[in-house]
Each structure stands twice: as structure tokens, then as C-alpha cells.
Image (tube, coloured by chain):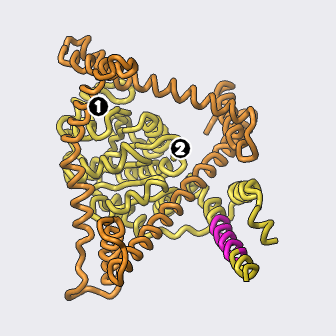
Chain colours: A orange, B yellow
Amino acid sequence: MEAQSWGDLLGMWLGVALSLFIFSFLYKDNPLYKLAEHIFVGVSAGYWMCIGYWQVLHPNLILRLQAGDWRYGAAAIMGVMLLMRIYPRWAWMGRWPLAFMVGIFAGYNIVYTMQAQVLRQIEATILPLWGAGLTWYQWLINLIVVGGTLCALLYFYFSKEQRGPLWGRAARVGIWVLMVSLGAAFGYTVMARLSLFIGRVMYFQDVWRATVNFFS
Amino acid sequence: MLDYLANLDRRWIFLALAVAVIAPLLWPFHLPVEPSPLSRKFYQTVEDLPSNSLVLLSFDYGPGTKVECHPMAVAMLHHLFRKKCPVVCIALWPEGSMFARQALQEVAPQYGAREGIDYVNLGYKNGGEVILRGMGEDIRAIYSHDLRGQALADLPLMERVRGWDSFALVCDWSMGRPGLAEFVRVVSGQYRRPLLAGTSAVTTPEAYPFLNAGQVESLLGGMRGASEYEVLLGLKDGQATRGIDAQSVAHFLVAGLIILANIVYFAQERRRRKAEG
């Protein structure tokens, strides 16, 4: 990171100050934190509004209408109908484009989502538990995957009481499997949050170096 | 002591974590980084590409996970340019096109890679999965210009690009949606192209089922994955490796605090049961 001008340097230090304002909440709520929070909300809203206009509306609707492709007029009308939900009297108009969107997305996604995220995942849990060439380690891994999946699924079957030597124990194992997966997810989340903090501290270091280089 | 620990002001924990992160960054002690089998497979998949193979990188992350995903992207650009593999960059996240530009500006000059010939940055397109499917049918219907505004027809590298079949390898740097799930459905599921992924730590558990099912060739998870890849490439001063000491110390501290909290909890329970007779 290099500062080429006073403007660059000011921007960098503004980033440092706003980060520290946000971190100050860890001590207690204070006006500097509120200031940084409000700036963030305002800037985010403006940023996403610009992205929405220049990346979605302008290229996909306005430019096409300007080019004389009036088919997109139907999309514009449906967009306006969606906004009618603001007025309770005309809110019913919003249901039609919403129904259209739900129908399109369901049809568009259902086949590939089923293939990639349901069928392939089921296929990946159909593993051999006996047979030639199966080492004890592979057998153990396969047993954990097959048994863990079945037990976790049994836990989510609520039409039969989860009691008894077989059903009750299998559901209990299912809870353990879920606990282990939640523990792994928690560990990764801790790692991510720490990485975020590390990234900020590295940014402070880089700004400090850039400042020293700028004045030397 | 037990009551003091049970009611410890959490700001002491924040302070301890801050020290655990800041101290190793100020005084690094270079803990060894041992690449995992997954990182090795990721490295080997890129290494096995024939020279001049066309690769697509998708920068689907924002500032929140830049510290995790960006070092992976920079390291992979080093790897690809070393092997003289041309790169096409896209982004399904608005900030992704800026990160792609930053990474290319940092790495490309070191290998003499030229924009339009050795790499192209097509920038951000809104639409997620719709964009990916559209690229499979006709990439020119989706992208008419690159990020600089240069028409695709004027970019020599784009003559080689028709659809997903043009790419020998696709890699997605993903921190959420749109991201890896969309790539799995379209690139791996529909077009059967080899897919690699680098994910932020939060999204890594969601990526493992794809890996287990063979839909993703290999995976780099979080800052640790990025650091392992940097080590395999022999990159000096890698951004992820720079932060890995701090992460290791902070993880030890968090693990220690969890153990301590459990000891305090069970000791209190035991005391309560004794008091109740």
C-alpha cells in the first residue's frame, strides 16, 4: 500500500479512525461508535443504490428501451406493479409480478439444484461397507458418513416418538452428529472473525508504513 | 476465584484477544505452516495444467473477507502466470472487480503479463447464476466490454473464449451467495468443467459436501488455506502467511478460554451439588 498524495493519506487515516471508532463499542457504547455506524449505514445505502441503478436498471432496462426493444416495457410495468405494495389500496397489484418471479425462479433452479445439491449429495453418501479392497480406515470413514447421515435424518423424523433401544439411540447419535457439525461450523466462524480482526490490524500496519514512506 | 472467573468482565477477554493478535504481527515468530492434503491437491491441480491453458477466476468476495480470499487469488495468479496460463477474471460481487484489478496490477507486471493478451478482467455483472448460465450459451451476450471499456472483439485473448468449454479450469473465490453453490450447479453440474474453490472460513463448512461429492476438485479454506498455498508456491511475504502467527496464537487463546470456562462451569456445578447435600 502506497500513498501517492495527501488525499490518499487522508483516506487511509480515515479508514483507521473509523475502524477504531467501531472497535470502541467493545469497551462501551459511545458517540464515536454511533457516528461510524451512521456513516456506514448511509454510505452502504448510497453505494447499493448506485450499484442497483448502474449495474441493474440502466444496462438491463433503460439502455434496452432506448435501443427500441419494447419487450422490456413489460418488465418495467411489472417493476412498477411491484412497487405498488407501498399503497395498501393497490397492494394486490404487487402479487402478479411476485408470482411471476417465484414461478420463473422455481422453474429455472429446481432441476439443477436437485441435481447438484440433493441427488449428488445423496449419491456421495452411498458408500460400500464391505467388499474386497476396503481398508479398515476407509470402512470406518464410510461407516461414519453412512451412519451419521442416517442417524441425523432419523432425528428429524417427528412422526414417531424417539424412544426405544433402536430408534431412541439412533436419534441420540443423530444429535451428536449435529453437535459435531455445529462445533466445526463454530470453529470456522471463530477463525473467520479473527481473520477479520487480523486484517484490520494488518491494515493499520500498512497505513503506518505508507505514512512513514510518504514523509521520508 | 471461581466466582471471579465465572463473572469475569468480557472486556478482559477482548483485551487478551487484541494482545494475542497484535503482538505476533508486531514481533512475528514464523510458526511453521504444514500444507494439508487439500492444499496440496489444489496446488497439484493447477500445477498439472498444460502451459497456455485458459483459466477463469471469479472474484466473489467483499471487503469483509478480503484478508482471507484475496491472498489466495494473488497466490493463484502467481502460479498461473509462472506456468504461462492466460487468465479471464469475472466477479459476481460488485467489489470483486476492484479486487481482481488490484491482484492483477500487483502480480501481472512481475511476469510481464499483458492485459488483453495474457489476462482480461471482465468486471462485475449482476445476476449470479443467470450470468453463469448465460456465459455458457454466449459469453458475448453477457459481456460486451472488459472493465476498462475495451470491446471484447479488440481483446486477442477473448478470441479463444466461447463458453465454459473454453476453460481448462475454473476457480471461484467465494464468501457466500452468489458464489460457490452457483458455480457448482452451472460449471460443475451442467458443463462438467473442473472446479476449484477458495472460501472464507465461515463458508468453508458449506463447501465440504461439494468436495465430498467430487463436485469441487479441491478447496482452500480461510486464511490457513491461503497461507498453505503461499508456502507451497514458495512466496515470500505472502499476506496470509504474515497473519498466520496471529491467528495461531489467537486460536490457542480461544481454545484455552473454552477449556477454562468449562472447568469453571463444572466446578461451580459440583459446588452447588455439594451445598445441596
B233, A205: nearer the viewer: A205
> Which amino acid, by three-letter code, is at mark 2?
Gly
Q: CA distance from mark 2 to mark 1?
A: 32 Å
Say if A20 sits above or below B81 in the image. above
Helix, strand or loop at label 2? It is helix
Which region of the structure is painted magenta?
Answer: B252-268
Q: Quadrant of residue B277?
A: bottom right
Which x, y percent locates residue B177? 38, 44
Which x, y percent locates residue B241? 57, 58
Which residue in the protein does label 2 denote? B64
The residue drawn where x is 18% and y is 49% is: A111
The residue drawn where x is 25% and y is 13% is: A65
Graded by Cα atoms within 10 Å as few (under 14), some (14 to 19) or many (20 or more), the crowding at tag 2 reads: some
B274, A4: nearer the viewer: B274
Q: Quadrant of residue B113?
A: top left
Graded by Cα atoms within 10 Å as few (under 14), some (14 to 19) or many (20 or more), the crowding at tag 1 reads: some
Tell me the chief SS of the magenta region: helix
Instruction: Check the picture and name the quadrant holding the C terminus of chain A.
Output: top right
Residue B195 magenta: no
Helix, strand or loop at label 1? It is loop
The residue drawn where x is 42% and y is 47% is: B176
Say if A44 sits above or below B180 in the image. above
Q: What is the chain letter for disc 2? A: B
Which residue in the protein does label 1 denote? B155
